[in-house]
Every structure is written in structure tokens, then in C-alpha cells.
Image: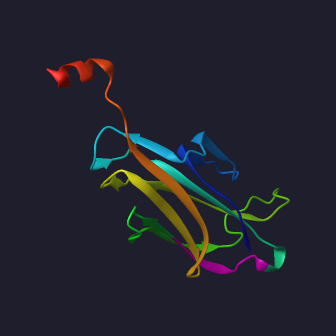
Amino acid sequence: MELSYAFLARAAEQAQDGTIHVFGADFDTIQLPAFPAMAPPFALLISFACRPDELGDVHEVEIQIEDPHGVRSRAAEKQLVLGEGLAETKRRFRASLLTMIGMLFSEAGEYRFVILVDGSVVKTLPLLAVQTAPKPAEKVEAER
């Protein structure tokens, strides 16, 4: 089994035929008005390719979030059974995970999503949290 892709999206859903519908994909920066801030939920999409002889194998997939200080916390954990839910018409064997994440950003800075399979890191995705600049009208009121 090998990782095919992993990326963040504003929203996503998986259809019964295994296709994934994605909106606002592949971002690496989130803008928030102030800190701490709760971000709107977003999706983490992960896909693995596997060989026919791996079908039925079970793997533990864990997603950790690393804050700007390097401290990690568990965001999600799932048991992945290769081939489970595959449509018979699929010519390639793939196992996909779709996880919705709502998270609190304690401060601005570089966060990372760390993806582990069976305890080993297979991918990290950076996410920079920045504070949005006040709108011009807000700047004027703040100066008064």
C-alpha cells in the first residue's frame, strides 16, 4: 500500500460509487480574524493505492495536528480495511479516507497535519494560520 495523495479542501463528500466531490481544494493557508479562533470545518482527503494481494489488509491510520511549537495532538483515528467499499467496476484498487476537521487555532503560525499509518509517518501537510488585516473602515474606527 502506498499513499497516492493527501490534501486539504474547504468541503468534500464521497459518493456511493467511490468518487470524491471536492470544493476549494489544496489550500495551505487559513485566514482568521483573531486568535484564538475556531476555524470553519474543512476536509482532509487521503487516498492509498494497493495491489490486489493487499485487499483485506487492515491498517491503523492516525491524523495528528502539530502546533507552531511542535506539540502534537490526535485529531482522528480510523481502521482502514483495504478494498472495503470498492465498487466492482473499479479497475484500480484504492482506499480513501475523508475526515472533516473543526479545529481551534490558539495562535498564528505554522501548523502541520501528520498522517501516520501503523505508527509510521507517511505524509505531513502544512497549514499556515494568519490573522486577516482589518478592513479599511475598521482601521479608521480603531484609530479614533
Q: How many marks?
A: 0
Q: Is residue 53 left or right of residue 106?
A: right
Q: In this view, does 90 lie above or below 118?
A: above
Q: Is residue 40 left or right of residue 82?
A: left
Residue in the image at 41% along x and 48% along y: 129
Q: In which quarter of the image is the N terminus?
A: bottom right
Residue bounds of the magenta highlight: 54-62
Residue in the image at 65% along x and 51% along y: 16
Q: Is residue 104 above or below residue 30?
A: below
Q: Residue 24: x percent and y percent?
A: 57, 38
Q: In this view, does 50 lie to the left or right of 33?
A: right
Q: Is residue 41 above or below residue 136?
A: below
Rendering quarter of residue 83: bottom right
Outermost residue, left side: 144
Rendering quarter of residue 23: top right
Residue in the image at 54% along x and 55% along y: 44
Q: Residue 96: x percent and y percent?
A: 65, 61
Q: Residue 28: x percent and y percent?
A: 54, 48
In terms of depth relative to the viewer, which is nearer, 4 or 52? 4
Residue in the image at 77% along x and 78% along y: 54
Outermost residue, front side: 143
In terms of depth relative to the viewer, which is nearer, 110 or 81? 110
In terms of depth relative to the viewer, which is nearer, 140 or 38? 140
As for residue 66 lying within the magenta part, the answer is no
Outermost residue, right side: 91
